[in-house]
Image (tube, helix red, strand yellow):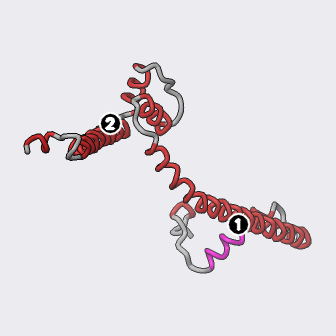
Amino acid sequence: MSSDNVGSPNGGSASTFAEKHRQRTEKLRQDKDSRRANEIDKMTNERLERELKAKGIPTFGTRQERAARLKVACGLPASSDADEKKPGKAKKGGVVEEIERLRQQREQRRRKMEEDRKTKEDEKSHNEAMGLPGDVDFQRMVTQFRTDSKSGKALSPIMGQGAG
């Protein structure tokens, strides 16, 4: 009876025991790999670089690239790399949307600049017809100042508001 617990070829419990042992061993290995991968992810840049140099691995690239190289050198499974790439594919749609949004903003800025340029040309021709000196920007500042003065906005003390 005790021979059944140890595992005899006839009882089939030996294969069950061996399978359970393999599963436990695999789980322990996965846990150890997971802890090591987390440890690598949490390493400072300096420590990560030291570890790479100690193993003779190139230290160039982004932090994620260096961490991935160190994980591979430590014999960690590449499944974590595959998991990181999956969200990248999901992000692709977001990246395309972001590019489209930036393109639309650029077109709006260009349209606005074109409208401003036309308005400025119109104002310039109007100022020349009126005989006003200076450029359009200067005339806009003068007009803005006069509008602010008339609307009752407080002038700064430098302007001599109290003197008069």
> How much space separates mark 1 and mark 2, taking CA atoms?
46 Å
Q: At 86% across and 67% down in the image, what residue appears?
A: 121
The dominant secondary structure in magenta is helix
Mark 2 nearby-residue class (10 Å; few <14, some 14–19, many ≥20): some
The residue singled out by tag 1 in the image is 104
Q: In the rendering, at what x and y percent does residue 42 appear?
A: 34, 39
Q: Which numbered circle lies on residue 36?
A: 2
Q: At 51% across and 64% down in the image, what residue appears?
A: 157
Residue sitting nearer the eye, 66 or 16: 16
Q: Mark 1 or mark 2: name the one nearer the start of the chain.
A: 2
In the picture, measured across the screen, residue 43 lies left or right of residue 161, that is left
Mark 1 nearby-residue class (10 Å; few <14, some 14–19, many ≥20): few
- Magenta stretch: give its range: 141-150
Confirm whether the magenta stretch covers residue 19.
no
Label 2 element class? helix
Q: At 72% across and 68% down in the image, what residue appears?
A: 108
**Tag 2: amino acid:** Arg
Confirm whether the magenta stretch covers residue 145.
yes
Question: How many numbered marks appear?
Answer: 2
Q: At 60% across and 80% down in the image, what residue appears?
A: 151
Task: Work out which residue is located at the far bottom of the displayed protein and give it.
Answer: 151
